[in-house]
Image (cartoon, rainbow, N blue to C red):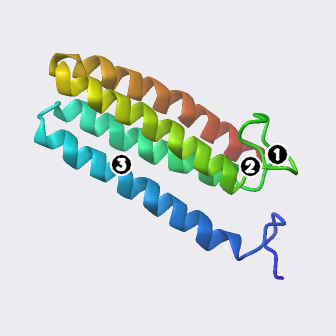
Amino acid sequence: MYRNPSGMSLSFMPKQKLLAFFLVLSLFSLNAQAEEHRHGKLWRVSVAILGAVTIADMQSSVGRMEANPLLSSSDGRFSGRGMALKGVGVGAMVGAQWLLLRKNPKAAPYAAGANFAAAALTGAVVVHNHMLK
């Protein structure tokens, strides 16, 4: 099997792109549902930014040693299992916000603040990962 310079098999890359595509698609789906209930433009923008930063984090971590044992595979690297768990975690957070905002739309700025904070922390991890390359 052919391998790229990082040692990952080339057949893994299409799976990574497919998973990223489904994550973005699910975020847009949640975003479209949120528009029906008028949660606020700021919250929708924060969800899109959080999704983009999460995908960037996954891209910067794939094939590297993972410090979080929950996200690491059996060989200690970040791979499909970690991507799935990270996607589920972000999706659950956004889904819980969407459910809460249906009942209390005035809380949208607070939910957006939480999303921006999570995106900032994740963005710092992305920068750190790219500095290690």
Query: How many numbered tags mark residues here?
Result: 3
Q: Is residue 73 above or below residue 11?
A: above
Q: Quick check: 113 left or right of 64?
A: left
Q: Quick check: 125 left or right of 109?
A: right
Counting residues from the start of the chain, the first of labels 1 and 3 encountered is 3
Q: Is residue 94 above or below residue 82?
A: above
Q: Are marks 1 and 3 in contact (CB under 8 Å)?
A: no
| Residue depicted at 73% across the width and 76% down the height | 10
Mark 2 highlights which residue? Answer: 78
Q: CA distance from mark 2 to mark 3?
A: 22 Å
| Residue depicted at 53% across the width and 61% down the height | 19
Neighbor class of circle 1 (other Cα within 10 Å; few <14, some 14-19, many 20+) is: some
Q: In terms of depth relative to the viewer, which is nearer, 92 or 62?
A: 92
Q: What residue type is disc 1 on?
A: Met
Mark 1 highlights which residue? Answer: 65
Counting residues from the start of the chain, the first of labels 2 and 3 encountered is 3
Q: What residue type is disc 2 on?
A: Phe
Instruction: Say which mark, if any, is on residue 27.
Output: 3
Q: What residue type is disc 3 on?
A: Leu
Q: Where does the image place residue 66, in percent across and percent down from the top left?
A: 78, 41
Counting residues from the start of the chain, the first of labels 2 and 1 encountered is 1
| Residue depicted at 40% across the width and 22% down the height | 114
